[in-house]
Image (cartoon, rainbow, N blue to C red):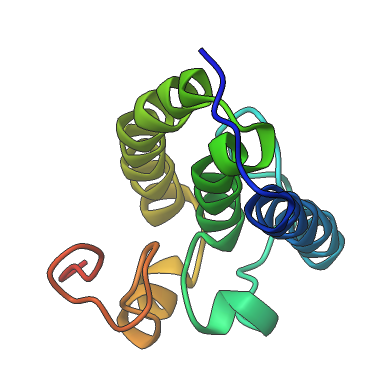
């Protein structure tokens, strides 16, 4: 099933997807400890600058936003499925990651107190916690 958008919505979706790809890439440069495996590396420290001063998981936020706009960029309802699946998967991953970081990364608990938003800034109902 294909959606037939005017040029502008599709271009807007592509623009948002590209911006978030760029942000994720730049974010990875700021946090060289980012990995597909949840673990704490030797001599790892807490990153508190840049987007990490606003939310604790800016890379996940960027990925979710990118997947949210992918259906618009592709002009396809089918692309909504990966987005819908990604949200609960990312929430579970964030919770697991935070358990490991709280246990193994010195200073992470203080960082959580200073940066209360896990994923969505200024939304205490969804993303703030009392870690």
Residue lying at 84% horizontally and 54% vertically, measured from the top left? 25
Residue 117 image position (x, y, % from top left):
34, 73
Residue 52 image position (x, y, % from top left):
58, 75
Residue lying at 62% horizontally and 28% vertically, measured from the top left? 37
Residue lying at 61% horizontally and 47% vertically, measured from the top left? 66
**Residue 46 shown left or right of residue 17 in the figure:** left
Q: How many dots with numbers?
A: 0
Question: Which image quarter: residue 19?
Answer: bottom right
Q: Quadrant of the C terminus?
A: bottom left
Residue 33 image position (x, y, % from top left):
74, 50
Position of residue 87 relative to residue 3, above or below, is below
Residue 98 image position (x, y, % from top left):
38, 49
Position of residue 37 relative to residue 43, above or below, is above
**Residue 73 shown left or right of residue 124 in the figure:** right
Given residues 58 and 1, the one toward you in this image is 1
Given residues 108 and 15, the one toward you in this image is 15
Question: Which image quarter: residue 85?
Answer: top left
Given residues 112 and 81, the one toward you in this image is 81
């Amino acid at each position: 099933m294909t959606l037939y958008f005017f040029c502008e919505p599709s271009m807007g979706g592509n623009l948002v997807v590209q911006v978030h790809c760029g942000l994720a890439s730049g974010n990875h440069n700021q946090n060289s400890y980012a990995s597909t495996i949840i673990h704490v590396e030797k001599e790892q420290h807490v990153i508190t600058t840049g987007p990490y001063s606003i939310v604790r998981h800016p890379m996940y936020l960027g990925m979710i936003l990118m997947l949210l706009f992918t259906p618009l960029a592709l002009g396809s309802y089918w692309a909504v499925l990966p987005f819908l699946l990604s949200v609960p998967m990312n929430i579970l991953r964030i919770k697991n990651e935070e358990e490991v970081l709280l246990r193994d990364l010195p200073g992470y608990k203080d960082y959580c107190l200073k940066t209360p938003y896990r994923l969505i800034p200024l939304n205490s109902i969804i993303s703030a916690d009392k870690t």
